[in-house]
Image (cartoon, rainbow, N blue to C red):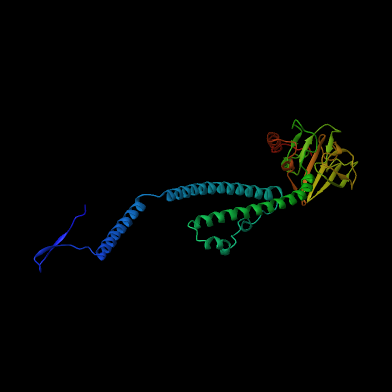
Amino acid sequence: MARIKYYYDTETCRYERTRVTKMDILTNFLGFLSVALVISIVIVVIYNTYFESPTETLLKKENKELADHYKVLEAEMEGVQEVIDALEERDNNIYRKIYEAEPLPLEVRNPGRGGAEMYKKVMEKGLHNRPFVVSMANKIDKLKRKALIQNQSFDRTMQLARNKEMVLSSLPAIQPIENEELTKLVSGFGMRINPFHKARVMHEGLDFAAPRHTPVFATGNGKVIAIKSNSVLETGYGNYVEVDHGFGYVTKYAHLGDIYVKKGDTVTRGQKIASVGSSGGSVAPHVHYEVIKNGQKIDPVNFLMYGLNDSDYKKLLKLASRENQSFD
């Protein structure tokens, strides 16, 4: 039951009943709405400050998942970068050690970005995570460019390989006689005792001792450029064969017995070109083997790479390093 309000009228000296006008009702109602609005705003602010809405919770969860995915992608890209770096290092070693060529310059292998215009569209979108997007795009772009350059480098190495195939087949890379037991190398390259006057002199090749008529093989593809046969002198190289392998390499096989090729013949690696003898200045049947690069006599043991494992090669190196008496 609504309360009835009275007020004291001083003119009539009586209590009069209070009359509520429409304006009073409207004023009270507006006041109530104002208070309710202020309270509502305060409640909303407090709620938004200390509590998350379902939408915010979902968005924060998605952002966290995206951040985790970004870290995973970043780690994977670092792994790809390491693989490309390893490929580049191997590629450079192939250029230097196998093809004897200069590798790609560093400025070619590390290209710059496409400029500020490249990510202009990303920047204009006003994304909240623009730095992450631009950083990721930059890394992906760099990996794509480096992969493209590495692919082009592989094309170059394939061309070098085709050219190098002829070089590799021409290199004097085998022993001039069969020597499976590795016992026939009796004197190496360097200062050795001459068997005639017993003085230490420069021995410019390798001596392989073997019975007479043992086959002597060409150590690489090439062309016979010189022959000396039927030598009656007991000094010098005696019967010998010289083979030009191209690319600055010449091999010489001396103190031979029979010779099975003639000047101008083309020979292949492993082809029998002569037999072991003891012609010229020789104290026992053997073949004196020399490698000449651009007119300079060099140590042939450095070229004995085919048909030998590491242990065999080390054994030959040890035999060739002995400062003993040569056979010529």
**Which sits in the foreground, 171 or 95?**
95
Check the image and name the residue furthest to the bottom: 11
Q: Residue 23 in the image: x percent, y percent?
A: 26, 66
- Residue at 66% x, 49% y: name it: 91
Check the image and name the residue furthest to the top: 181
How many numbered tags mark residues here?
0
Check the image and name the residue furthest to the left: 13
Q: Residue 43 in the image: x percent, y percent?
A: 32, 53
The answer to whether 3 is drawn above or below residue 14 in the figure is: above
Q: Residue 232 in the image: x percent, y percent?
A: 89, 41
Describe residue 128's horizontal placement relative to residue 227 as left or right: left
- Residue at 79% x, 44% y: name it: 169
**Which sits in the foreground, 103 or 37?**
37
Q: Residue 39 in the image: x percent, y percent?
A: 30, 56
- Residue at 77% x, 48% y: name it: 167
The answer to whether 65 is drawn above or below residue 209 in the figure is: below
The quadrant where residue 238 appears: top right
- Residue at 29% x, 62% y: name it: 30
The quadrant where residue 113 appears: bottom right
Q: Quadrant of the C terminus?
A: top right
Describe residue 185's horizontal placement relative to residue 235 as left or right: left
